[in-house]
Image (cartoon, helix red, strand yellow):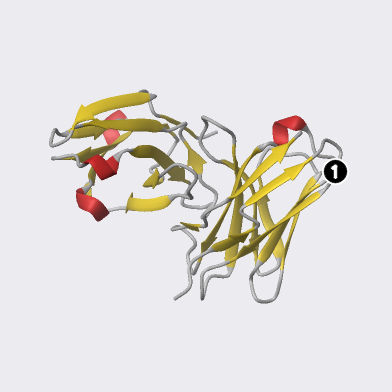
Amino acid sequence: ETGVTQSPTHLIKTRGQQVTLRCSSQSGHNTVSWYQQALGQGPQFIFQYYREEENGRGNFPPRFSGLQFPNYSSELNVNALELDDSALYLCASSGVGGETQYFGPGTRLLVL
Amino acid sequence: AQSVTQPDIHITVSEGASLELRCNYSYGATPYLFWYVQSPGQGLQLLLKYFSGDTLVQGIKGFEAEFKRSQSSFNLRKPSVHWSDAAEYFCAVVQNTNAGKSTFGDGTTLTVKP
């Protein structure tokens, strides 16, 4: 059974640019959630995708958007990057019921 | 809105000593409760979870946690800490009607002295 994978592992962008982060969910999981973890803080819920539809969103602006594909993999897109977007972005997948999430290793984004 | 408080930002214990990490939550009903561990530069690993039933739950790596409804707490314990337990620990809650949308505390960093 393959766990949750994310790519890339690290990324450096400049302010105003756009970025796409990718996540492959654990085998058999149809729900993917994205979290932002700033330095020294706990993860903050961005949004969740279930069967290719957004299924809940946290307190993040519309420039944070996502997609889920038929194979349940997912993308997180961030437009007009700001310095405060620098963080570890975590993807988590869950299966039937969805209560238990399994996290990927994260993508560390640095915005200069 | 639900919230999670981990009162201890940093805890240092000696190897072999016992450990207790505190977690308090604010929510109108009993949520699902989780503890995760995060090593530097890594993702989150699930240690244990509580949904219902027995209030003392066992997890991986010798960890356990006790749910106390009256105190809105879900404290993590380990009888004897190993040097490899040094990491950051996060408590999280999920509304049972909002599966997969976790609210996390800000974490407790554990340092283990030889």
* Residue neighbourhood size for the residue with mark 1, other residues' Cα within 10 Å, grouped as few (<14), some (14–19), many (≥20): few
Q: Is residue B59 visible?
A: no
- Residue B89 vs residue A55: left or right? left
Expressed as whole percent of the image width and height from the top left, the position of residue A39 reads: 56, 32
Which residue is disc 1 drawn over? Answer: A17
Viewer-proximal residue among B18 and A101 = B18
Residue B53 shown left or right of residue B40 in the figure: left
On the image, the x and y values in percent for residue B87 come to 36, 39
Q: Is residue B95 visible?
A: yes
Residue at horizontal 53 percent and vertical 62 percent from the top? A93
Residue name at image x 45 percent, y 49 percent: B44
Subunit of label 1:
A
Across and down, in percent, residue A102 comes to: 47, 59
Q: Is residue B104 left or right of residue B65?
A: right
The image quarter containing residue A17 is: top right
Q: Quadrant of residue A12?
A: top right
Q: Amino acid at mark 1?
A: Gln
